[in-house]
Image: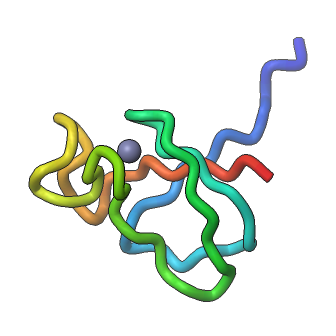
Amino acid sequence: METLVATKLYAVADVIPVSGDYLCVPCGYLQYFEAGERFTPCLACLAGTSDGPSGYQSVEDEFWQFIA
Ligand SMILES: [Zn+2]
């Protein structure tokens, strides 16, 4: 079975490992991030802030997924 696709998620508190587009899992928003910086809350759904979707309201909640 080939189901082990890399789907690691990153939180706002994490350092960005690779430059590229990342997907906000709860809302589907795509944002470009530069390696070495830190992730930001999602501009579209505010995930990573107290105003974000349920379950994504902390800087330690992981929701950014590397796309390309
Ligand atoms: Zn979002």
Q: Residue furthest right?
A: 2
Closer-to-camera residue (44/17)? 44
- Quadrant location of ligand 1? top left
Residue 37 image position (x, y, % from top left):
55, 86
Residue 10 image position (x, y, % from top left):
51, 58
Q: Name the residue at 35% across, 57% down.
A: 43
Up the image or down, 18 lies above or below 61; here it is below
Specify the quadrant that holds the N terminus. top right
Up the image or down, 68 lies above or below 7; here it is below
Q: Is residue 45 left or right of residue 9?
A: left
Q: Name the residue at 67% across, 52% down.
A: 66
Residue 44 image position (x, y, % from top left):
35, 48
Q: Is residue 28 left or right of residue 61?
A: right
Closer-to-camera residue (32/4)? 32
Residue 40 image position (x, y, % from top left):
39, 70
Q: Name the residue at 63% across, 87% down.
A: 36
Q: Is residue 35 left or right of residue 57?
A: right
Q: How many marks?
A: 0
Q: Residue furthest bottom?
A: 36
Quarter-of-image position of residue 13: bottom left
Closer-to-camera residue (1/42)? 42
